[in-house]
Amino acid sequence: MRILTTTALRFAAAPILASGLWIGAAQAVEVKDVLTTYADIALAGYEDSLTTAQALDAAIGSLVANPSEATLNAARAAWIVARAPYQQTEVYRFGNPIVDDWEGRVNAWPLDEGLIDYVDAAYGSESDANPLYTVNVIANANLTIDGETVDASAITPAFLQDVLQEAGEVEANVATGYHAIEFLLWGQDLNGTGPGAGKRPATDFDTANCTGGNCDRRAAYLQAASSLLLSDLEEMVANWQADGAAREAVLADPAAGVATILTGMGSLSYGELAGERMKLGLLLHDPEEEHDCFSDNTFNSHYADQLGIRNVYTGHYRRIDGSVVEGPAPVDLIAETDADLAREIATKLDATTLAMAAMRARGETVEAYDQMIGENNPEGNAVVQAAIDGLVDQTRSIERAIAALDLSGIEIEGSDSLDAPDAVFQ
């Protein structure tokens, strides 16, 4: 029994379109067709991520060639655009080992930015957990990692990926991906839960009028990180092509493939987004728990994550060029077993998307996400909590769908911030 939704959102559209559901004529749904749609949306999302990353790379090239506030702002704008399609692919992480093993190279956070570049004195000079906390590779052509001297004279993609990324086996040593680029474009956000993002000057890349020192190495780092992001995204695009390893893995076992889809939807909804990315920061009122913390773009990223969950469930993805990739989807499979549950999940996904849209609208017109989660801001806190509540609520219905489809071996990722909040303060 086909359940359709009229909600098809372009990420750039600020308002949510009103949606309605209706039941079409009964028809059998082939699981392989559902899995094919899932893979097709993955391919389209990673292709869009690559296209926007290529535009970002071109903007970074212009910044390095001609450092100015205009070229810096253009590179920042390109970074924000690039985040939108990528965040919609995060629903593919959980349950897809090929994606999850790769994801840390492009979207790992939080990062100890002192590994990369200069930081404010308030950042501190050392960390018991990270010997490279303030090593500042941009200012130092020689490093000591695990007692060994490392030649850092040439900042190349290979150096970032093979030597610096998670150096010393410390996860906070994030040297690559969107957030390393974000830090280099914006610099630290020193405003706490007050207004304002990072304020790195364009002259930090200007070798003729250099601020911050080592402008040539900073430019080299930015370009190397951007080049590496492109090659990483190209790799994932290939994984979802017709003969790609990720597509083949999903299609190999129908039951396991459906389990993968629902694992991704539930784990991103609950443990990752509602828990680690949102509730934790709200409990602590801590701006350091903000995902896109240098750029104050977090409200956009969270919104895109929710769109990604709904894209997969409804089998409908609107590409950056306006075209649509769609087909049989989990909503169809669930409707064959329990049409009311299929509607319930769709309705809850829409409700959460509306809550996320309200948070996004507040971020665009009132205050940034780090301000929303600050202390003594009950209105902002409530907007964030409403989105968290929606994510938790939709997860409960996703869990019911797992039971209805009689799928086994699925583990939805949890979070202490939701399951044992007192532990967060210990």
Image: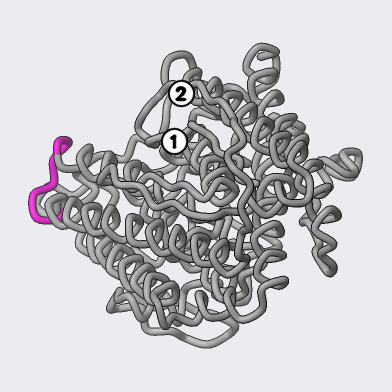
Q: Which mark is residue 17?
A: 2
Residue of label 1? 8
Chain part drawn in magenta: 64-70
The mark nearer the N terminus, 1 or 2, is 1
Nearer-the-camera pick, 121 or 351 = 351
**In the image, residue 360 above or below residue 1:** above
Disc 1 marks a residue whose amino acid type is Ala
Q: Residue at x 77, y 34 (%)?
A: 393
> How far is disc 1 from disc 2 in space, using C-alphas?
8 Å
> In terms of image quadrants, where is residue 167?
bottom right
In this rendering, the count of numbered labels is 2
Where's residue 303, x and y in %?
52, 36
Can residue 104 be seen here? The reply is no
**In the image, residue 204 above or below residue 367:** below
Q: Are marks 1 and 2 in contact (CB under 8 Å)?
A: yes
Element carrying mark 2: loop
Where's residue 305, x and y in %?
54, 44
Q: Residues within 10 Å of mark 1 (few under 14, many from 20)?
A: some
Q: Residue at x 43, y 21 (%)?
A: 15
Query: Looking at the rendering, in which quadrant would you find the C terminus?
Result: top right
